[in-house]
Image (tube, rainbow, N blue to C red):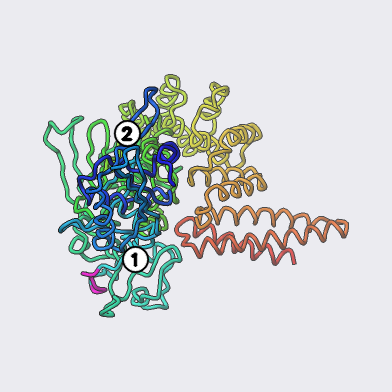
């Protein structure tokens, strides 16, 4: 026979105590919640006729009040409703236990988890119920999705067919342009090939379209409508964004700009980022791929925050993504609560494990290099702000929305001086530009933007003297600089002159030693490896790439990293080839060098061709093709 007092002490999380049974449906709802077993505990019990309380010392206790014979009829009523009103029906076991009063009994209903998602019909309302924090609650929104997904009864929203749209509602030109940018377009195939329900763009996403089971009509999936729809808002009302600009720190003053954006979410993303870039004062930073690094707001932080809001939002709600720029911050508001798999406290800290709410959307944005790799969005935002010396982003989450607040740099007024420096350089006033920079650095020698601009000026005039003066004055504090600034200084030392002197090479090595852990950012990693290759530190470059790819496997498809690794192997092959041309080399050494050349050359070709196959464009494409041409000539020489 069950010991209720022992049950209280051992399994209180799986027990609901009811002194009286005034509401039969309340008991059934709780049994359904235990059967749904969201916490994965195996089920639970409802004890009727027992009151949970505390003893004289404050420890859990139970009083067995019991039910009269007349009230024991609830047994049959509960079981009947579990069969008639629950879908799929459940059959809880029932045990009747005696109390100290022979006229009263305790009923114990036991519900075992079934691995199914059960709903309960109460009058005209049907709902799913779960246990959260020792309470029975209706499963709504994300909690319901989590329950259904865990039971295999829920297809992720972005992968579902849109029952109102047809393939005629897709913009095939937009689809083709995107496929070209992603590096998967095959001109030998008609565009209709990609609409075939059996064809998918990648193993990481389902086909763009699917066949409706009953009618056989081919319909696009929700993610395809969002990415390539002619008018996505016709089929997904919430697929829009708004941008507002306020001159003050709140909405007390009228907006100076307000816009509601529609079209595909790719179009909306670019529109939002462009508007924020115009709002933010900026200086040129060629070190981040030709983009602008904003001083008031880092461009990468803005981009990641906007993309996160568009990709990871809940599109079942009709509300738009809202971006509001104030004088001192940017608020980015995304409708829908957190994905149930995300730990709220970790999210508020900006430290969450990778979770994709709309996986197909996320994959496309990453492939287009509009977003960082999986799980890198929030860390990238915080790292970008830290590099600029800005306060960290603040994250907020409710049941209905998620928000990211990006603070403006507290010293963004300094931008005007940096802009004047850039203008001086453009107009040939180099001495004046350097004087201003050195004055700013005397006041704040570890400001990322100022140090980076000094390095940029040195590179533009092909003179390392300004950087050497800075390093001489602040040699002891170089470790305090962000990795991106250390890499910018190393760039200047190694590229400002055709042949860096030994002092410049030694200082560059020291800076790279400080920046050796710059593996959380793709741009910094590329610059780090490039500098190592300039220094002929080929093995160190290969090891850095290997370490980074071990930590971030998704970077393995990045064309720039593949090209750099191919170049590193190419340099190793070149070294082995030079050894082979040495006169009087012993036969054993010559054979080892020939084998090393062959292996390194094969590895170089493999990575360089992979860079081309993964969509290398622009300078990366030119470098990969040039390296392959050099490899071909090198092989001919070594034969």
Q: Residue at the spot x=82%, y=61% of the render?
A: 591
Q: Residue furthest left?
A: 254
Instruction: Judge by depth and name the residue closer to the eye, 567 or 435.
Output: 567
**Magenta span has 164?**
yes
| Secondary structure mostly taken by the magenta-highlighted segment of the chain | loop
For disc 1, the marked residue is 177
The numbered mark at residue 296 is 2
Magenta part of the chain: 163-168
Q: Residue 277: in sight, yes or no?
A: no
Q: Residue at the spot x=37%, y=60% of the render?
A: 116
Instruction: Answer left or right for 497 relative to 392.
Output: right
Q: Would you call the spot at circle 2 few (<14 residues within 10 Å), some (14-19), or many (20 or more)? A: many
The secondary structure type at the circle numbered 1 is helix
Q: Residue furthest front?
A: 102
Residue 99, placed above or below residue 467: below
Instruction: Answer left or right for 50 relative to 635.
Output: left
Residue 129, position as x, y percentages in the image: 28, 51
Q: Residue at the spot x=36%, y=73% of the render?
A: 194
Q: Would you call the spot at circle 1 few (<14 residues within 10 Å), some (14-19), or many (20 or more)? A: few
Q: Which quarter of the rendering shows the C terminus?
A: bottom right
Q: Residue at the spot x=55%, y=41% of the render?
A: 495
The secondary structure type at the circle numbered 2 is loop
Instruction: Answer left or right for 557 relative to 94.
Output: right
Quarter of image, res 257: top left
Residue 385, placed above or below residue 178: above
Q: Earlier in the sequence, mark 2 or mark 1?
A: 1
Instruction: Judge by depth and name the residue closer to the eye, 37 or 58.
Output: 58
Residue 580, position as x, y percentages in the image: 79, 58
**Magenta span has 200?**
no
Residue 213, position as x, y percentages in the image: 30, 77
Q: Residue 406: in sight, yes or no?
A: yes
């Amino acid at each position: 026979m069950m010991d209720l007092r022992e049950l209280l002490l051992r399994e209180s999380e799986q027990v609901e105590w009811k002194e009286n049974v005034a509401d039969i449906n309340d008991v059934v709802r709780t049994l359904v919640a235990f059967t749904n077993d969201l916490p994965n505990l195996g089920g639970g019990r409802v004890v009727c006729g027992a009151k949970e309380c505390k003893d004289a010392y404050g420890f859990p206790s139970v009083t067995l009040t019991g039910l009269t014979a007349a009230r024991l009829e609830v047994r049959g009523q509960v079981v009947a409703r579990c069969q008639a009103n629950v879908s799929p029906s459940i059959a809880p076991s029932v045990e009747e236990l005696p109390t100290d009063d022979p006229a009263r009994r305790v009923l114990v209903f036991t519900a075992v988890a079934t691995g199914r998602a059960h709903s309960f019909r109460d009058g005209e309302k049907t709902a799913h119920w779960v246990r959260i924090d020792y309470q029975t609650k209706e499963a709504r929104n994300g909690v319901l999705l989590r329950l259904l997904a865990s039971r295999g009864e829920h297809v992720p929203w972005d992968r579902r067919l849109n029952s109102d749209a047809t393939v005629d509602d897709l913009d095939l030109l937009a689809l083709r342009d995107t496929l070209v940018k992603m590096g998967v377009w095959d001109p030998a195939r008609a565009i209709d090939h990609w609409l075939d329900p059996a064809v998918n763009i990648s193993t990481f996403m389902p086909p763009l379209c699917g066949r409706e089971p009953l009618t056989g009509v081919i319909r696009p999936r929700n993610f395809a409508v969002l990415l390539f729809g002619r008018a996505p808002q016709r089929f997904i009302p919430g697929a829009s964004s708004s941008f507002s600009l306020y001159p003050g720190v709140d909405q007390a003053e009228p907006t100076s700009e307000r816009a509601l954006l529609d079209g595909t979410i790719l179009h909306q993303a670019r529109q939002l980022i462009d508007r924020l870039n115009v709002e933010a004062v900026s200086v040129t930073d060629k070190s981040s791929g030709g983009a602008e690094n904003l001083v008031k707001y880092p461009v990468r932080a803005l981009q990641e925050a906007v993309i996160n809001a568009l990709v990871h939002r809940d599109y079942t709600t009709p509300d738009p993504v809202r971006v509001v720029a104030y004088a001192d911050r940017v608020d980015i508001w995304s409708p829908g609560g957190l994905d149930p798999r995300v730990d709220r406290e970790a999210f508020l800290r900006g430290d969450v494990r990778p979770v994709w709410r709309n996986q197909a959307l996320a994959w496309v944005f990453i492939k287009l290099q509009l977003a960082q790799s999986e799980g890198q969005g929030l860390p990238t935002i915080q790292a970008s702000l830290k590099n600029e010396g800005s306060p960290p982003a603040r994250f907020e989450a409710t049941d209905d929305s998620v928000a990211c607040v990006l603070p403006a740099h507290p010293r963004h007024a300094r931008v005007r001086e940096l802009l004047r420096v850039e203008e001086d350089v453009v107009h040939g006033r180099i001495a004046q530009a350097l004087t201003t920079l050195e004055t700013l650095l005397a006041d704040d020698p570890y400001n990322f933007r100022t140090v980076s601009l000094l390095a940029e000026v040195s590179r533009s005039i092909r003179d390392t003297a300004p950087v050497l003066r800075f390093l001489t004055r602040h040699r002891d504090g170089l470790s305090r600089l962000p990795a991106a600034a250390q890499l910018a200084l190393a760039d200047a030392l190694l590229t400002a002159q055709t042949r860096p002197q030994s002092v410049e090479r030694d200082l560059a090595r020291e800076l790279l030693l400080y920046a050796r852990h710059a593996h959380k950012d793709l741009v910094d990693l590329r610059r780090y490896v490039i500098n190592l290759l300039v220094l002929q530190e080929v093995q160190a470059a290969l090891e850095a790439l290997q370490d980074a790819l071990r930590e971030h496997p998704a970077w393995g498809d990045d064309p720039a990293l593949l090209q750099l690794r191919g170049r590193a192997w190419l340099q190793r092959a070149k070294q082995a080839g030079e050894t082979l041309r040495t006169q009087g080399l012993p036969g054993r050494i010559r054979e080892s060098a020939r084998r090393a050349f062959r292996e390194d050359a094969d590895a170089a070709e493999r990575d360089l061709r992979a860079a081309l196959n993964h969509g290398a464009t622009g300078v990366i494409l030119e470098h990969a093709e040039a390296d392959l041409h050099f490899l071909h000539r090198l092989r001919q020489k070594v034969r």
